[in-house]
Image (cartoon, coloured by chain):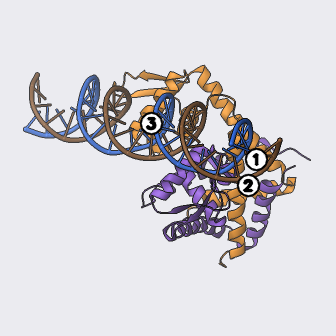
Chain colours: A orange, B purple, C blue, D brown
Amino acid sequence: MREPTEDQLAALGAAFETFGRRYKLADALRSERPLAELDKAVLLYVAEHAGCGPTDVARFLGVPTTTLSSATDRLVKRGFLKRERIEADRRAVALSLSEAGAACARGLVDAYRQLHLLMLSRLAPNERDPFIAMIGKIVYDDS
Amino acid sequence: MREPTEDQLAALGAAFETFGRRYKLADALRSERPLAELDKAVLLYVAEHAGCGPTDVARFLGVPTTTLSSATDRLVKRGFLKRERIEADRRAVALSLSEAGAACARGLVDAYRQLHLLMLSRLAPNERDPFIAMIGKIVYDDS
DNA sequence: AACGATACAACGAACTTCGGATTATTCAAC
DNA sequence: GTTGAATAATCCGAAGTTCGTTGTATCGTT
């Protein structure tokens, strides 16, 4: 397979750099108290895996369990997360979202959805599926 | 223009989420003492704009000048950055990289290059230019 | 010369991450 | 059945980051 050219690499790098900065600046326009990046990830994971334990989340996100404990503390304190001792194994804790937490997660998902919508809207309709297919190749193909 | 479909949005969202996590985990495999995200951005900006001032960098990156001052402190402390009072305006400071800083910047750029190379390698050769063109549309088109 | 504006650094408060120690509970072995 | 190792999670404290406030030096203008 031919190698990508230097021009191609440079163009991709420039685009990503610009994208990263734009995205960061846009994110800075949030109105509410900022939720730490880790906390957002936890919220979204628990939304999809109700009843999971802190260790699961920590392993999935690649952070120490103590760090995750801090994150869950913050989320519980804000009323977004519920911790419940489970009877099957009384050492374990089952995490689940409160109603406010679920609402916040929906808001996050929707914000991402808006971003993706904006991105796809900039492509011609007949480019969108090929683009998504290429992204999929890049992300999921573990050669 | 037809709207993107929900399926398209969902597929893109899932791909980005996976990508973000993979990228974070891969980044965690760095061997050296971790350089803060902001510091990396500063290093790369100064590499391209030798002699610029802290205020320029802060405005470009969208952070308060005090935050940027901390970042330059860290970089100077590590011997990556040089601060020089300039005679034309003795309030101003001209930032430039030391040799070690330049080497570090080259390392960073090369790491990104490797990532981009990996990404493009997963596409067929005839897909690469169209892909880059689409990314460009998404990033640079400000409709 | 005096005034306000500008460029930057120093200090301190609030927050996040994470290693080490600690508690509570389960499992395994004898 | 008791002891001991392993597991799940939290508490505590150190180190580091961000950012607002304050202070200092310098510049341009009147």
Residue that numbered label 2 is attached to: A132
Mark drawn on residue A85: none
Residue at the (76%, 39%) spot, across then down = A114
Secondary structure under the numbered disc 3 in the rendered image: helix
Quadrant of the rendered image containing residue A118: top right
Residue that numbered label 3 is attached to: A68
Q: Are marks 1 and 3 in contact (CB under 8 Å)?
A: no
Quadrant of the rendered image containing residue C17: top left
Residue type for callout 3: Leu
Q: Is residue A94 above or below residue B83?
A: above
Mark in the foreground, 1 or 3:
3
Q: CA distance from mark 1 to mark 3?
A: 32 Å
Secondary structure under the numbered disc 2 in the rendered image: helix
Q: Is residue A142 above or below residue B70?
A: below
Secondary structure under the numbered disc 1 in the rendered image: helix
Rendered location of residue A92, percent (x, y): 37, 28
Q: Tell me, yes or no, if residue B11 can be seen here.
A: no
Q: Nearer the viewer, residue D14 or A76?
A: D14
Q: Chain of mark 3?
A: A
Q: Are marks 1 and 2 in contact (CB under 8 Å)?
A: yes
Residue type for callout 1: Gln
Mark 3: few/some/many CA within 10 Å (<14, 14-19, 20+): many
Left or right: A22 in relation to B5: left
Marks 2 and 3 on same chain: yes
Q: Residue furthest bottom?
A: A2
User: On the rendered image, what quadrant is the N terminus of chain A found in?
Assistant: bottom right
Mark drawn on residue B8: 1
